Image: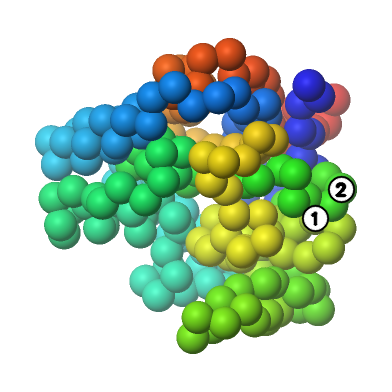
Amino acid sequence: MSAVLPSIAPDIYRIAPGFRALSISVQAATVADERVGQAALREACEAVLAGQPAWAEAHLSAWSDLFRAFGAKPKRTPCSAEALRKRVLKDGAMAALDPLVDLYNAVSIRYAVPVGGENFAAYAGRPRLVVADGTEIFDTMKDGQPGSESPEAGEVIWRDDIGVTCRRWNWRQGVRTRLSVADSSMWFILESLPEMPLEALHAAGRMLTDGLEKMMPGVRCQTVLLSKESSDT
């Protein structure tokens, strides 16, 4: 199995010099325990309600500031981690969706970190974090029907050779690369800013890979840290 090595455009580090992320490539195995994700989700929600982690608000506030820096409105389109966390604080829990989605949502909630989960078999070429020119195509659903739209020029997006895979950095994932427990080739991206301690980012990555190993014994995972320093070497 080859590790997925995303490309991060130099413009991204000008917007967010301290941006760093974990890229986790996964070759799935047969699912032995679908309850792992639900258990992780319950525990993560309990941690949030107990006020953990202590740096969560500072990290999510930094993401809001970053969204404003490239023209997004975080109150209307917050980063994915903030949207999940607000739902937990409002409802006290989160309903199960899919064993795998539950697991990576649990990591996002527990560590206040945006986590993307992608069906890598649906990708064309390498994942790229770039500033949009506004002509890219993002596949979505409108009124229950497949549709498409384009990001705004200047918006930060994840994309591949076909089009946008996630809008506004980590706000909304596209339909084409959506992940489920039935997929075999997976890619996860955990995105952080300096307000999240680096050791916490690594702990979040271990929570994900440990959970995958419990869910599907025999799974293979490769983790790579992405940062400005690593891109300069």
Kindly check if marks 1 and 2 are in contact, taking CB atoms under 8 A apart as contact: yes
**Which residue is more in the foreground, 187 or 49?**
187
Label 2 sits on residue: 125
Q: How many marks are shown on the rendered structure?
A: 2
Q: Is residue 3 above or below residue 44?
A: above
Q: Is residue 211 above or below residue 92?
A: above
Label 2 CA crowd tier, 10 Å (few <14, some 14–19, many 20+): few
* Residue 223 in view, yes or no: no
- Residue sticking out furthest to the bottom: 143
Residue drawn 76% across the image and 26% down it: 3
Q: Is residue 36 above or below residue 97?
A: above
Residue 130 figure quarter: bottom right
Residue 122 badge: none
Taking 179 as reference, is 49 left or right?
left
Residue 160 badge: 1
**Which residue is more in the foreground, 123 or 35?**
35
Image quadrant holding the C terminus, namely top right
Rendered location of residue 97, percent (x, y): 37, 50
Label 1 CA crowd tier, 10 Å (few <14, some 14–19, many 20+): some
